[in-house]
Amino acid sequence: MTKAQTPARGRPARLSRDDVVAVAKRLLENGGGEALSIRRLADELGSSPMSIYRHVESMDHLIVLVLDELAKEIPKPDLPDDPRERVVVLWLALYDCLAANPWAQEVLAREMSIGPSVLWFVEEIIKSFVDGGLSLKRAGQAYNLTWKFSVGTLMIDQGQTDVEARHDGPSIARQFMITHAEGYPTLRALMAEVPNADHRGRDRYLMNLEILLDGIANWK
Amino acid sequence: MTKAQTPARGRPARLSRDDVVAVAKRLLENGGGEALSIRRLADELGSSPMSIYRHVESMDHLIVLVLDELAKEIPKPDLPDDPRERVVVLWLALYDCLAANPWAQEVLAREMSIGPSVLWFVEEIIKSFVDGGLSLKRAGQAYNLTWKFSVGTLMIDQGQTDVEARHDGPSIARQFMITHAEGYPTLRALMAEVPNADHRGRDRYLMNLEILLDGIANWK
DNA sequence: ACCTGAACACCGTTCAAGT
DNA sequence: ACCTGAACACCGTTCAAGT
């Protein structure tokens, strides 16, 4: 009860950090990365921009807090006995959460960091790699590799979806590609054989993850 | 000579698209992603912000043009006979260019796209996968997988470096991690065994790429 | 202790006008 | 055809003052 020892003094707090973080999260959920700003947050809370800074240090700090709030909500999956299956199940849980919350990727790009609440997943993934036969150090490296691959996947897939939505149609980049493929026979053949190739989505993520795990299993 | 058929009319152009793109690139090289803005660009060119829009459609369009300018400069490596070695050499050339130009990753995160000038690399990588025994479709998928991994690597490594530079010291996220690792035995053991684990750099990228290629070679 | 208003130094983009 | 100035609707953050 250390808190009760300090008697209430000065103006009573109308806002709390939890309020600020909760509203920030709601703004992101409703309007994506662009919807979050200190000023809009203050509007939504009926306060002045500066009152936000009583409760969080900066925009960067706020982002870390919101990401952690999201991480808390990820349902912890049942863990199979087989270590490799466990890695797949754990990564799919993280993938599903991030894929369902595109704003999280946007803010991940702004401040590349994770809060304490994902540590359960990190712990279980590394442990699974160890159970699968890797040394502790190798398991850490394997975790790092799967993390890089997962972030790359989410960023690129979401980035493509965003660009398509903005220009309603294939992105500027894909148009460039189509227009300039003439000189490149393999590329042209590929575009002819699979013209609507789409490398996005959960199934493709799973397939690529399995390839990665094959490579890791083969580690010398 | 179609151009000469239109006689010069109206005010002569003081700016050109090439000028605009060149100065934008210089701003990025000197000051990173934050240094590029339409207004600063106009200042640097001695013009008003609006004159930029005569030569590029928007900020997004400008970013695509600057990235393509960078891609043009990537030296094309000598290609070994062995298809797998070829893939490694090609990806390392792309990695080296992007690792040497951190601003490119920042703008890659803003507008996820590539211009026509990287197509030579894409062509050669996909061709190498085909030469290595993959079907055309599989080769396209393999390219996409290595691209996702590469982008993830660059983003995360650079993101970590940025955050460390801003807070001069371990990032907020890493401090969270250290503080909260108590409940997680594997994590704690890993931090004790390799306290200064650094997963960044060219050697690690190469090592992970080889793991990926092992997994791809194992494709059923 | 907490909150506010005004200000600083910026953004991308649009509009109507100038040469 | 190309460029400009003024304006619109925003940013994050600092400072000094109010309750």
Image: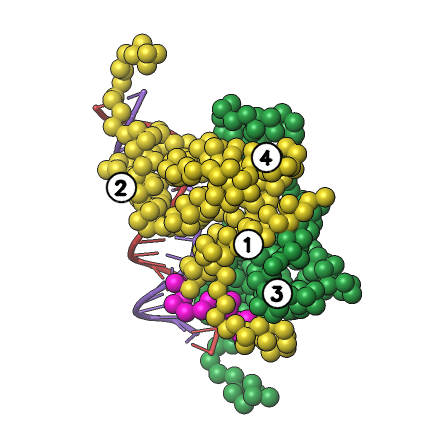
Chain colours: A yellow, B green, C purple, D red
Residue B154 is at least partly visible in this image: no
Question: In terms of secondary structure, where does tag 3 sit?
Answer: helix
Q: Position of residue A64 (x, y in %)?
A: 44, 36
Report which residue position mark 1 lands on. A208
Report which residue position mark 2 lands on. A43
Confirm whether the magenta stretch covers residue A174.
yes
The relative height of residue A46 versus residue A199 in the rendered view (above or below) is above
Badge count: 4
Report which residue position mark 3 lands on. B139
Q: Nearer the viewer, mark 3 or mark 2?
A: 3
Report which residue position mark 4 lands on. A131
Question: In terms of secondary structure, where does tag 2 sit?
Answer: helix
Disc 1 with disc 2 on a shared chain: yes
Q: Nearer the viewer, mark 1 or mark 4?
A: 4
Give the class, few, some or many, for how many residues have Cα within 10 Å of label 2's Cα (few <14, many ≥20).
few
Give the class, few, some or many, for how many residues have Cα within 10 Å of label 1's Cα (few <14, many ≥20).
many
Sequence order check, earlier mark of 1 and 4? 4
Residue extent of the magenta highlight: A165-179
Chain of the residue under label 4: A
Residue A137 is left or right of residue A105, and the answer is right
